[in-house]
Amino acid sequence: MKILYVITSTQTGGAEKALAALVTQTVKEHQVKVVSLKPLGPVAQELEKSGAEVVSLNMKGFIPFGIVKKLQAEILSFQPDIVHAMLFRGIELTRLACAGKGLKLVSTPHFDLSKKNFILRFIDKLLKDLDTLTVAESFSTARYLVETQHYRKDKVFLLPNGADKTVFFRDDALRDKMRKQYGFTADNTVFISVARLAPVKDPVTLLQAFRNVWRGNSAARLVYVGEGEERPKLENFIRQSGMEEAVLLAGEQRDINAWLNMADAFVLTSVEESLPIALLEALRVGLPCVVTNVGDMPLWVEHGKNGFVCKPRDVLLLSCFLTELLSREKREELQRGGVDISQRIGDTSPQYQHLYQQIYLKSFHVKTTGDTEK
């Protein structure tokens, strides 16, 4: 089969990482092309290395002048059997480009549509029926699409994000190597967050909470893996707080498994999410996690069992939970509690290959979205 992927960007993010993992498997059996609406980012190199053809439509700004025609030209040139679109603009513009052409179109949101404004939600509702199948990457997404956006149940398939256990796993030797490389001792409790430095991830709240913890325990450390527009603001906060030796803004990193193994606990303070892949990767490694109660995160972090859950922007409560994790005994207790939860995490790539085959043969049957009414 020929499979054309369309995504808004190839910058480093959860959706882009999911695409890279999926394409790596898809190219083994099919001819693959990836179209990025925006100029190519770091993930494009990974996609090309896997054997996929990658092109950019160089969309700039929010209003996509001429992009639909460019996308239609790419579709006409490649003649795909299946088109798979991801992220809001990637999905909506692909729907327009495919309209009336009889193409098999799959969409995977990888975002929380409920947080978009009324106009964007209306556009989605208007164009939704152009999909052959919508694959919801989280329970919260599936439920919102069916109950609020009125997607047809028989056209929404629930396939939660996953993390490959052959890529993400506990490695004590790697942990020792990374901690030695970055100067962390046995006395240091290392918290890690893997996310974009963007307002939606709310790194400021994390820094404020960590400052409270660090003032009471100077051996605490925070590592933030990710890049984004909030970096200058965060660097200024770190300087003003005198935490230059305690906080490492590591930027974008390739071997996330190594960085997770270095840490003692994972933290994600997002104000909106679907089901973040970084959380699943941390769970695979066996880290106790502290997350906000948005999206599907509370379904994977059971409060008091394998981590803690708090409201977004609650600096005080977050500080308390981080302080609890300074205790080695508490961390080990939560790690034990998370073993069965981490085993629920799957690898979505093989399931997508099966879906593509069913869609191509017109034999798929959706049976999972009935659960969204519960």
Image (spheres, grey):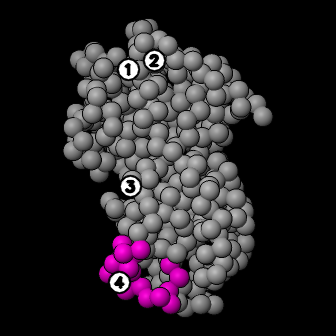
> Is 184 placed above or below 85 here?
below
Residue under label 1: 82
- Tell me the quarter of the picture where residue 213 sits: bottom right
Residue under label 3: 167
Q: Is residue 247 left or right of residue 147?
A: left
Kind of residue indicated by mark 1: Ile
Query: Which residue occupies 44% across, 31% down?
Result: 352
Q: Is residue 178 magenta?
A: yes
Query: Which residue occupies 25% across, 19% down?
Result: 78
Residue under label 4: 180
* Quarter of the rendering occupied by the C terminus: top right
Whether residues under marks 2 and 3 lie with C-beta atoms below 8 angstroms apart, the answer is no
> Is 326 placed above or below 128 here?
below
Residue under label 2: 359
Q: Who comes first in sequence, dot 4 or dot 2?
A: 4
Q: Who comes first in sequence, dot 4 or dot 1?
A: 1
Kind of residue indicated by mark 2: Ile
* Quarter of the rendering occupied by the N terminus: top left
Could you tell me residue 298's position as x and y percent? 68, 54
Q: What is the CA distance from the residue labelled 4 to the residue labelled 1?
A: 47 Å
* SS at circle 3: loop
User: Quick one: label 1, few (<14), some, or many (20+) residues within 10 Å?
Assistant: many
Q: Is residue 79 left or right of residue 323?
A: left
* Along the line of sight, the residue nearer the viewer: 219 or 65: 219
Q: Who comes first in sequence, dot 2 or dot 1?
A: 1
* SS at circle 1: strand
Furthest residue to the right? 374
Mark 2 or 1: the one toward you: 2
Q: Where does the magenta region start and end?
A: 172-190
